[in-house]
Image (tube, grey):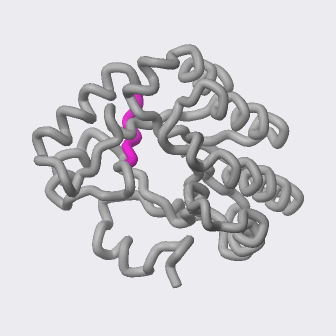
Amino acid sequence: MFKHTIPSIFPLIAPNVTWKVKTNDKVLYLTFDDGPHPSITPMVLSILEEYNAKATFFCVGDNVTKYPEIFNEIISKGHAVGNHTFNHIKGWQSTNQAYIDNIKKAAEVIPSNLFRPPYGRIKPSQIKLLKNDYRIIMWSILTRDYDKSLNPHTTLKHLNKLTKPGDVVVFHDSEKAKENMLVMLKGMLQHFYQQQYQFKTL
């Protein structure tokens, strides 16, 4: 079952994107999609600070224009930022030109060479157009914090067993994910901090 992990064939099908980081060191790469959010993102930043953890925030350009002070706070606290398009659009449902234009619009307010496609939905032709300018980041662990049917405590136990060194873990600093995300983020940080893991930016 690939509810929280990716099929092993995915990196073979799409080798030009980053799914996880090859390392034997105790390092995890926590990422947050869809922000910045005026109240939730500061909560996340506060929790990360408790564990001296750094993370990568894949921001929606439209949200950056609405909440520039939160975006600047992310950067000032030593975290990394990435482009998540301007309007959170799906590559599968967009022409290549419309998709690239939306990313370029986001790039005007998000200075980063990191890109994550919303929903992970991107065409091979779009990867080809982006790969020289961006490091395209997918994930190896999907928390599914946006899924209201999840029991976050049960899911947390499962995630802690699945997660290995070098994994790229996806959370969402959004209204929909808030309740699950806060439980699972705190739980994962505590669990892996006790095992002397480090949490780094991509």
User: What secondary structure prevails in the magenta region?
Assistant: loop
The residue located at (82%, 42%) in the rendering is 51
Q: Quadrant of residue 150?
A: bottom right
The residue positioned farthest toward the front in the image shown? 149
The residue located at (37%, 57%) in the rendering is 120
Name the spot of residue 161 as percent of width and height, x first: 73, 75
Which of these two is toward me, 43 or 50? 43
The residue positioned farthest toward the top in the image shown? 69
How many marks do you count on the picture?
0
The residue positioned farthest toward the right in the image shown? 194
The residue located at (76%, 72%) in the rendering is 154
Name the spot of residue 183 as percent of width and height, x first: 76, 53
Residue 113 vs 167, above or below: the answer is above
Q: Is residue 114 magenta?
A: yes
Q: Quadrant of residue 27?
A: bottom right
Give the left or right position of residue 183, taking residue 86 as reference.
right
Residue 10 vs 23, above or below: the answer is below
Give the left or right position of residue 74, taking residue 65 as reference.
right
Which of these two is toward me, 158 or 178? 178
The residue positioned farthest toward the bottom in the image shown? 1
- Magenta stretch bounds: 111-116
Residue 183 vs 5, above or below: the answer is above
The residue located at (63%, 32%) in the rendering is 41
Name the spot of residue 142 as percent of width and height, x first: 55, 63
